[in-house]
Amino acid sequence: MQSVKKAVLLMFLAAMFAALGAVSARAQEATVSVNVPFDFIVDQHALSAGKYDVQKQGAFVSLRGSDGKSVYALLFPGSSKRQDATPHLVFTRHGDEAFLDKIVFSVGRDFDLPHSNREKELIAAAPVSDHVIKMSQSGQ
């Protein structure tokens, strides 16, 4: 009976430490602050130029503008082979429209965003992008 109590107590403590570790890891999710000098599109949302706080929240990213409004988008594991440690956003410009395509929080923590329907249309019409724009933390 004593060994059963010990086993239950150990499982309970292990579960508590695992839960605390998950909360701690979630609290440590990075926030990147950028000043985007042009209008851009994230998923199906058109956003105005301005300052944004970008934060990973599980499988999603939130972009919170200076007006306090947030937009959320799904993230996919990044495809970058570069080991770039500087937090930054990568935009692709098709014509006069810019699309947020990648977010890098640190080395090994880069994420791709899915192409919006509008971006897919533009890619199909003209397969070569005009520009790729990198925005570092604080817009540098």
Image (spheres, grey):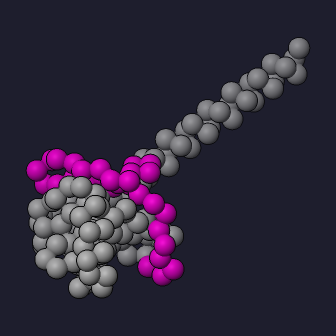
Name the residue furthest top: 1
Query: Which one is in front, 120 or 24?
Result: 120
Which residue range is magenta in the image?
Answer: 55-84
Report whether 119 appears left or right of 57.
left
Residue at left offset 13%, top offset 54%: 66
Name the residue furthest front: 125
Place of residue 74 in the rendered image (x, y in percent of width and height, measured from the top left): 38, 53
Query: Which one is in front, 138 or 48?
Result: 48
Place of residue 102 in the rendered image (x, y in percent of width and height, measured from the top left): 36, 69
Instruction: Examine the rendered structure and indicate whether residue 68 appears above or below residue 127.
Output: above
Q: Quadrant of the N terminus?
A: top right
**Residue 75 placement: quadrant:** bottom left
Find out whether residue 57 is within the magenta segment. Answer: yes
| Number of marks | 0
Can residue 20 be seen from the camera position used here?
yes
Find out whether residue 75 is within the magenta segment. Answer: yes
Q: Quadrant of the C terminus?
A: bottom left
**Residue 98 placement: quadrant:** bottom left
Report whether 59 appears left or right of 94.
right
Report whether 8 appears left or right of 27.
right
Place of residue 46 in the rendered image (x, y in percent of width and height, measured from the top left): 16, 59
Residue at left offset 50%, top offset 49%: 25
Place of residue 88 in the rendered image (x, y in percent of width and height, measured from the top left): 32, 72
Can residue 53 be seen from the camera position used here?
no
**Residue 54 placement: quadrant:** bottom left
Residue at left offset 11%, top offset 62%: 48
